[in-house]
Amino acid sequence: MSWCVFAATAVVITLTTVVANVVALLALWRVSRVPSHYPLMSLVTADLLVGSAVMPIGGARELFVFHLDKTLCSVWSTLDVLGCTASILSLCALGWERYRAVTSPLAQRRDTAKHLAMMVWPVATTVALLTAFIPTTEHHDPGKAQKACTVNINVGYVFGSILLSFYTPAVVMIVFYTKIIRSLSAPPPIRAHRGRSPIPEVTSIDVRQLPNLNILTRAAALIPPDAILDNFSARQRRATMTILKLMTLFLVCWTPFFVMLPTDALCTCVSDSVWMLCTWLGYMNSAINPMVYAVASPRVRKALLGSHTSTTQTER
């Protein structure tokens, strides 16, 4: 019964991850390029890699007893670390983009967000390649373990990799979102003068300078500035809450694994069932991410429904 339950669960998680991320990837290609687009594309790509290349072999290894070829073992282990690390670092890049969007809404952050998304992959690749080259007593030892290909538990590698892959990004995201929440809870610093001109001025920032908002066209001259700013603030809050949900789910899904991994590296005392539970809880994050964003994002929902609108309205 337990075998059947896990088999069904693994199949559902794997198929959901692949389908959801393929659909999200196609939808993101069809919407306008905004700063959050680039780290989101990185996130979806990483999660799709986990679902298509990592989960099927991981599930098969749990369900059946067989030995992976040493080369295949190294490739699978590397892709496992690559996909999961890139997914986590992409969430970190999203956290930065939201932080800048809320605290410096007029700043040009598109190029920086794009470069951060691009940097995710060299860092993740470096962490992933090391798992294949740093020796571990249980990494590929057919005589010691039935499944042969196990996680690299070299103590030095484990603590170095979890620092780059999880703990540093987690701390950075917590700092970003703490500042974001404080900023959003503070009274709005932008206030418009009333009754002076068709397009009133703003004491600190001219609302006409807010980028990429269709509501700030000439036709919007008759819209009260307070309504414009309230709309802008509401968009910021919705977009930030979406990424905040992604970050919360990331912590819930991955914290058990990254507590278990160093523990087992030190004492080799974690049971196979706990390993399996924590690993697949982490994998499940790759299935949840695209669904959370698709549900929360009006732009992505429109793309999913087949809308070919050319709007440049953003979630900034």
Image: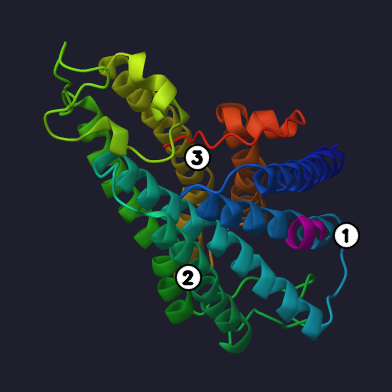
Horizontally, residue 40 falls left or right of residue 11, namely left
Stretch of the chain drawn in magenta: 52-56
Which residue is under mark 1?
64
Which percent across, then down, holds residue 5?
Answer: 81, 37
Q: Is residue 54 covered in magenta?
A: yes
Judged from the image, the secondary structure of the residue bearing numbered disc 3 is: helix
Asked if residue 203 is positioned above or below residue 136 in the image, the reply reads: above
Which residue is under mark 3?
246
Q: As shown in the figure, which amino acid type bears the numbered disc 2? A: Met
Which of pointers 2 and 1 lies earlier in the amino acid sequence? 1
Which of pointers 3 and 2 lies earlier in the amino acid sequence? 2
C-alpha distance separating marks 3 and 2:
20 Å
Q: As shown in the figure, which amino acid type bears the numbered disc 1? A: Phe
Which percent across, then down, holds residue 201?
Answer: 18, 26
Asked if residue 67 is positioned above or below residue 187 in the image, the reply reads: below
Specify few, some or many for label 3: CA neighbours under 10 Å numbering under 14, 14-19, or 20 or more: many
Q: Could one spot residue 263 in this view of the protein?
A: no
Which of pointers 3 and 1 lies earlier in the amino acid sequence? 1
Specify few, some or many for label 2: CA neighbours under 10 Å numbering under 14, 14-19, or 20 or more: some
Which percent across, then down, holds residue 105?
Answer: 30, 41
Q: Is residue 146 covered in magenta?
A: no
C-alpha distance separating marks 3 and 1:
33 Å
- Which residue: 53% across, 55% down? 38
Specify few, some or many for label 1: CA neighbours under 10 Å numbering under 14, 14-19, or 20 or more: few
- Which residue: 72% across, 34% down? 308
- Which residue: 47% across, 51% down? 91
- Residue 17 falls in which quadrant of the image? top right
Asked if residue 218 is positioned above or below residue 171 in the image, the reply reads: above
Which residue is under mark 2?
119
